[in-house]
Image: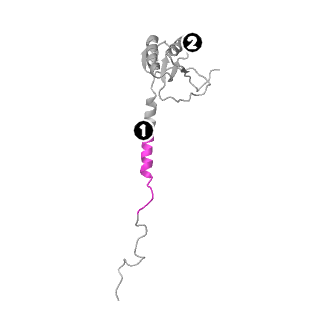
Amino acid sequence: MGAKLGGGGKRGKRRGSGVVSDINVTPLVDVMLVLLVIFMITAPMLTAGVPVDLPKASAKAIQQSDTSPLEVSVMNSGKIFMGETEVTIERLKGILQAIAAETPDRRVYIKADTTLPYGNVMAVMGAVSSSGFTKIALITDPREVVK
């Protein structure tokens, strides 16, 4: 007449005491949300440049296949910028000729103010073209079309 104190047989074992194969998704979601917030804050800061009042057009956006297109901006005052650096048109030609010697297939984006005379835009475009570049694009603001 002995008493059983547990532990014997199948009834005493706990079910599920082995390795749990479920993935805890909560830490993954937390990390992804933090990364999303970080990228949402830093992404607008990466697209810094010279503010130019772009003309409106109904053309589709250019598909960007190059990793680093060159950006030339022309302000309404006639000042020319290569990236964020102000240059003269002669200096622009020299810089672009040096770049075209290494990579002539790079894209060059020209941003010109909408109030700028047509001749000034064509002078900059001619300087870019005479430097050896063939992929030249004029940047417009696609949000509204002038009627």
Residue span colored magenta: 19-38
Q: What secondary structure characterizes most of the magenta part?
A: helix
Q: Quadrant of the N terminus?
A: bottom left
Q: What residue type is labelled 1?
A: Ile
Residue 81 spot, x, y in % from top left: 45, 17
Residue 131 spot, x, y in % from top left: 49, 15
What residue did someone put label 2 on?
Answer: 118
Dot 2 falls on a residue whose secondary structure is helix
Residue 5 placement: quadrant: bottom left
Dot 1 falls on a residue whose secondary structure is helix
Q: Tell me if mark 1 has few (under 14), some (14-19) or many (20+) residues whose alpha carbon lies within 10 angstroms of its own.
A: few
Q: Does the magenta stretch include residue 58?
A: no
The residue that appears at 62% across and 23% down in the rendered structure is 145
Residue 23 placement: quadrant: bottom left
What residue did someone put label 1 on?
Answer: 38
The reply, left or right, for residue 60 in relation to residue 16 is right
Residue 16 spot, x, y in % from top left: 43, 67
